[in-house]
Image: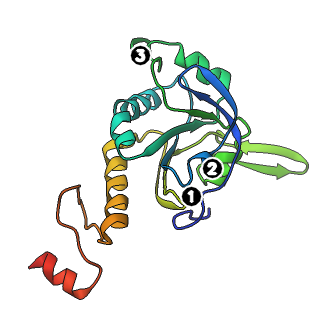
């Protein structure tokens, strides 16, 4: 699996559901480059258990992402019609009705594969294709800067839900570094002391 951090985010054009109800046939990340940061997160399946808890956690922090000029985008290997059907189910029944950020359909599994989050694999056994595991996405998350460079990623196995607050902390860390040229130590949060990347900065930080 290639490591994407520090590299250009793979390009794609795919169908997505936007605003919770509209199908956009040629959705791409490039529309945001030069304008916004992007948090692109993958999840395994619609109509499941951990996935809606993550999707709602992201939705509930939408204003925080927007304040930071971040486009929040979800993606799974389900079809756009599956996304739409799930978006019509109320939250109390396990649905995601009311979610407004774009959700990409990676029905051909090419995006998940390009980003290195596709679970399962195919083997050719004497001309017969065999699939081991399910070809669905792991819980991958990618923070992409305005130049289209991947600055951070995390990939969880299926049972392990992500921390939305950690995603926001990574956005804050990146934007702090871009603005001040100072690096962020372990467990750093916005407003805390950062470090100048030189010996003088080290002395200043530790006193």
Residue 138, x across and y down, in percent: 54, 44
Q: For the residues marked 3 and 1, what is the alpha-carbon distance in whole angstroms?
A: 33 Å
Vertical comparison of 66 with 194: above or below: above
Note whether residue 118 is visible. no
Note whether residue 111 is visible. yes
Which of the two discs, 2 and 1, labels the residue nearer the N terminus? Answer: 2
**Which label is found at residue 148?**
1
Which image quarter holds the N terminus?
Answer: bottom right
Residue shown at 38%/34% (left/top)? 62
Residue 89, x across and y down, in percent: 50, 13
Q: Which residue is mark 3?
A: 91
Image depth: mark 3 or mark 1 in front: 1
Image depth: mark 3 or mark 2 in front: 2
Mark 2, residues whose alpha carbon is within 10 Å: few (<14), some, or many (≥20)?
A: some
**Which label is found at residue 193?**
none
Q: Secondary structure at mark 1?
A: loop
Which of the two discs, 3 and 1, labels the residue nearer the N terminus? Answer: 3
Instruction: Name the image quarter holding residue 132.
Output: top right
Residue shown at 34%/30% (left/top)? 60
Q: For the residues marked 2 and 1, what is the alpha-carbon distance in whole angstroms?
A: 8 Å
Mark 1, residues whose alpha carbon is within 10 Å: few (<14), some, or many (≥20)?
A: many
Q: Secondary structure at mark 3?
A: helix
Q: Which residue is mark 2?
A: 30
Residue shown at 67%/21% (left/top)? 81
Which of the two discs, 3 and 2, labels the residue nearer the N terminus? Answer: 2
The answer to whether the residue labelled 3 contacts the one labelled 2, judged by CB atoms less than 8 Å apart, is no
Residue 8, x across and y down, in percent: 60, 62
- Observer-nearest of 32 and 205: 32
Q: Secondary structure at mark 2?
A: helix
Which image quarter holds the C terminus?
Answer: bottom left
Residue shown at 17%/60% (left/top)? 192
The answer to whether the residue labelled 2 contacts the one labelled 1, judged by CB atoms less than 8 Å apart, is yes
């Amino acid at each position: 699996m290639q490591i994407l951090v520090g590299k250009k985010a793979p390009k794609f054009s795919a169908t997505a559901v936007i605003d919770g109800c509209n199908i956009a046939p040629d959705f791409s990340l490039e529309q945001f480059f030069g304008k916004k940061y992007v948090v692109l997160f993958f999840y395994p399946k619609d109509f499941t258990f951990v996935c809606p808890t993550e999707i709602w956690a992201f939705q509930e922090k939408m204003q925080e992402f927007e304040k930071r000029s971040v486009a929040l985008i979800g993606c799974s290997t389900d079809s756009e019609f599956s996304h739409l059907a799930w978006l019509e189910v109320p939250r109390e029944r396990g649905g995601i009705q009311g979610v407004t950020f774009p959700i990409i359909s990676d029905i051909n599994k090419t995006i998940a594969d390009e980003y290195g989050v596709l679970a399962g694999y195919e083997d050719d056994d004497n001309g017969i294709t065999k699939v081991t595991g399910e070809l669905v996405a792991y819980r991958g998350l990618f923070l992409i800067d305005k130049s289209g460079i991947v600055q951070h990623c995390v990939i969880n196995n299926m049972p392990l839900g992500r921390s939305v607050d950690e995603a926001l902390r990574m956005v804050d860390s990146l934007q702090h570094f871009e603005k001040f040229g100072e690096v962020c130590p372990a467990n750093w949060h916005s407003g805390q002391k950062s470090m100048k990347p030189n010996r003088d900065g080290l002395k200043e930080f530790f006193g």
